[in-house]
Image (spheres, rainbow, N blue to C red):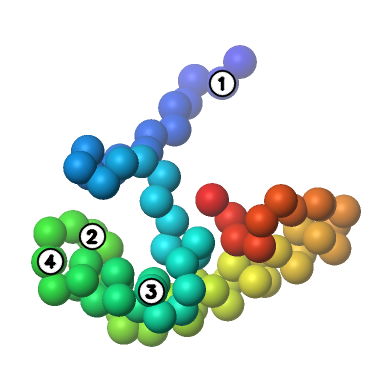
Amino acid sequence: MNDWNAYHYFEQSLGPFRNLSSLSADEAETVTQKIRLQGRNFASRRPTDYMTIRRTLEQRAYEQFVAKGGKPVQSYPH
C-alpha cells in the first residue's frame, strides 16, 4: 500500500477538471490570455508559447503511449 495522495485544486465557481487541451487552439489561447491578465495564480506566469509547448509534449506522450500498446480514449491526457 502506498502512503501518498493526489490533489486537484480548482476554483469552486468554475468546477473541477477543466482542461485547456480539450479546447480548440483559439479557445485555449483566449483562456490562457485571460489567466495571464488576472495574474491570480501560478498559471498566470506561464510563457506566451505555453500552449504550443504543451500540445507538442502531449502529442509526443500520445505517440509513445500508442507505440507501447496503449489505446487512448481521447487525443490528450487529463
Residue 57 is drawn in which quadrant?
A: bottom right
Query: Which numbered disc covers residue 27?
Result: 3
Q: Which residue is mark 2?
A: 42
- Label 1 residue SS: loop
Q: Residue 12 or 62: which is nearer the viewer?
A: 12
- Label 3 residue SS: helix
Q: Nearer the viewer, mark 1 or mark 2?
A: 2
Looking at the image, do the residues carrying marks 1 and 2 touch, with CB atoms under 8 Å apart? Answer: no
Q: Is residue 73 left or right of residue 25?
A: right
Q: Is any atom of residue 60 visible in this view? A: yes
Q: Which residue is mark 4?
A: 39
Q: Amino acid at mark 4?
A: Gly
- Label 4 residue SS: loop
Q: Is any atom of residue 50 visible in this view? A: no
Where the N terminus falls, by quadrant?
top right
Q: Name which residue lies at 87% across and 53% down.
A: 69
- Label 2 residue SS: helix
Q: Amino acid at mark 3?
A: Glu
Q: Is residue 76 left or right of residue 67?
A: left
Q: Nearer the viewer, mark 4 or mark 1?
A: 4
Up/down of 13 relative to 35, above or below: above
Q: Nearer the viewer, mark 3 or mark 1?
A: 3
Q: Which residue is mark 1?
A: 2
Residue 40 is drawn in which quadrant?
A: bottom left
Q: Amino acid at mark 1?
A: Asn
Q: Name which residue lies at 85% across and 56% down.
A: 68
